[in-house]
């Protein structure tokens, strides 16, 4: 069997996926038309599609901070067409269908409510649209959970406020995450919001994006301090014979999104491994921009160190690579076999936050 046939039939999970990063040109065009919103410089769907083809290509010495900031500018501006419950529902349903077509059976997806409430959209409008899609995901053989993300370049007060607004939905959201521009926006800025999220019983995760300022400090803080100090590990908690029951740590994060700079020092590799944290890597967008030689060796190092990692598409409408394309691209870049790709998906289901243990065991 070819590697691409193997990947096509492999049941997959995706745990680093921004639902707003799945907003296709077609959906954006329809929403803009329905909501009477002008798309500057676009007289047709074809014009709009061309805007999506902006390439973030590798140049020697590229600055990852600038890349992230440039991407985020386009990314947040594109969301202005999302206004109604149906817009959020349709965007999410579009991706559920994509997931089904790629045999993605388990999905934890981020959403950025502040990017919408700051434009005058009600938090409830966003939530009700997303929850309607979540209910229908089962019809497509996809188990879906929502991860609310704080937009970290907004204020600490705004971050705390959005978590407070989410209280009526606390049983319908699985985790709190942290995304957007990391530059001078450390995870410690949102400690109060993360503490509140823990009190809701949510899981905790945060982006530690690639090659950002103070990334090593951010990784350490997320592992040791986010949502409260991590206690000493008891060895037996880590040696759980049931692969599908992760130890329950009530403080520190439960996962890191990206976290690729963990590969930079033995101290960080040991720390993340001892904490038994998984990393949700998204290597394909970054390798395009930073160069494969600055990305794939780090993925290999983390994987070989025995840290659970998963491979994800991040923002597939913009970064082009799908979940399937990511698995194949990383297999090529890191010289991986079908067995390795199977291991990545095994890690992913092990790291999944569903309480449906039977689903995990049968996966
Ligand atoms: N990093 C930070 N913020 C984001 C990303 C990302 O990779 N994708 C969408 N928002
Ligand atoms: Zn991301």
Image (spheres, rainbow, N blue to C red):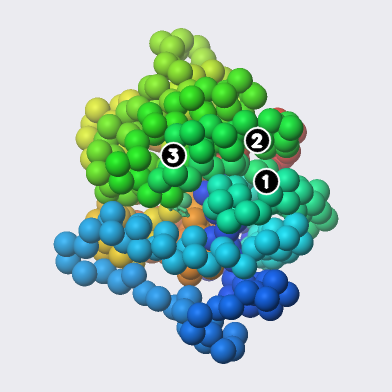
Tell me if 136 is positioned left or right of 56 in this view.
right
Task: Tell me: residue 232, above or below residue 164.
Answer: above
- What residue appears at the point 65 percent right and 43 percent down from the top-left corner? 146
Q: Earlier in the sequence, mark 2 or mark 1?
A: 1
Residue 143 seen in this snapshot: no
- Tell me the crowding category of disc 1: few under 14, some 14 to 19, or many 20 or more residues within 10 angstroms, Cα based: some
- Tell me the crowding category of disc 3: few under 14, some 14 to 19, or many 20 or more residues within 10 angstroms, Cα based: some
- What residue appears at the point 64 percent right and 63 percent down from the top-left corner? 82
Residue 318 seen in this snapshot: yes
Q: Nearer the viewer, residue 26 or 9?
A: 26
Q: Are marks 2 and 1 in contact (CB under 8 Å)?
A: yes
* Residue identifier under label 1: 123
Q: Secondary structure at mark 3?
A: loop
Q: Which mark is residue 155?
A: 3
Task: Tell me: residue 154, above or below residue 293.
Answer: above
- Tell me the crowding category of disc 2: few under 14, some 14 to 19, or many 20 or more residues within 10 angstroms, Cα based: few
- What residue appears at the point 16 percent right and 62 percent down from the top-left corner? 61
- What residue appears at the point 28 percent right and 32 percent down from the top-left corner? 217
Q: CA distance from mark 3 to mark 1?
A: 17 Å
Q: Earlier in the sequence, mark 3 or mark 1?
A: 1
Q: Indicate the position of residue 275 as horizontal and vertical percent values.
A: 41, 24
Q: Indicate the position of residue 91 as horizontal and vertical percent values.
A: 68, 63
Q: Secondary structure at mark 1?
A: helix
Task: Tell me: residue 187, above or below residue 97.
Answer: above
Q: CA distance from mark 3 to mark 2?
A: 15 Å
Task: Tell me: residue 90, above or below residue 266.
Answer: below
Residue 74, image quadrant: bottom left
Q: Earlier in the sequence, mark 3 or mark 2?
A: 3
Q: Indicate the position of residue 278 as horizontal and vertical percent values.
A: 46, 36
* Residue identifier under label 2: 165
Quadrant placement of the C terminus: top right
């Amino acid at each position: 069997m070819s590697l691409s046939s193997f990947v096509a039939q492999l049941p997959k999970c995706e745990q680093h996926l921004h639902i707003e990063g799945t907003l296709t040109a077609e959906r954006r065009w329809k929403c803009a038309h329905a909501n009477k919103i002008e798309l500057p410089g676009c007289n047709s769907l074809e014009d709009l599609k061309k805007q999506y083809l902006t390439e973030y290509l590798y140049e020697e010495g590229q600055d990852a901070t600038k890349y992230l900031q440039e991407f985020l500018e386009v990314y947040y501006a594109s969301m202005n067409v999302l206004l109604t419950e149906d817009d959020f529902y349709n965007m999410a349903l579009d991706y559920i269908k994509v997931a089904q077509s790629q045999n993605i059976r388990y999905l934890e997806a981020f959403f950025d409510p502040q990017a919408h409430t700051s434009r005058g959209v009600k938090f409830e409008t966003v939530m009700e649209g997303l929850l309607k899609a979540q209910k229908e995901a089962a019809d497509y053989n996809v188990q879906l959970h929502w991860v609310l993300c704080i937009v970290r370049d907004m204020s600490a007060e705004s971050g705390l406020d959005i978590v407070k607004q989410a209280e009526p939905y606390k049983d319908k959201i699985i985790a709190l995450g942290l995304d957007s521009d990391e530059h001078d926006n450390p995870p410690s800025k949102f400690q109060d919001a993360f503490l509140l999220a823990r009190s809701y019983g949510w899981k905790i995760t945060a982006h530690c994006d690639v090659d950002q300022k103070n990334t090593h400090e951010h990784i350490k803080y997320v592992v040791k301090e986010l949502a409260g100090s991590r206690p000493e590990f008891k060895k037996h908690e880590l040696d759980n014979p049931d692969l599908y029951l992760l130890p329950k740590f009530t403080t520190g994060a439960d996962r890191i999104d990206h976290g690729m700079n963990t590969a930079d020092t033995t101290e960080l590799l040991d720390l993340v491994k001892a904490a038994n944290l998984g990393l949700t890597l998204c290597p394909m967008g970054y390798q395009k921009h930073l160069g494969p030689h600055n990305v794939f060796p780090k993925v290999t190092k983390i994987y070989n160190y025995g840290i659970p990692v998963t491979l994800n598409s991040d923002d597939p409408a913009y970064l082009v690579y799908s979940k399937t394309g990511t698995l194949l691209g990383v297999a090529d870049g890191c010289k991986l076999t079908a067995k390795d790709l199977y291991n990545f998906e095994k890690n992913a289901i092990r790291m999944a936050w569903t309480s449906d243990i039977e689903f995990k065991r049968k996966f």
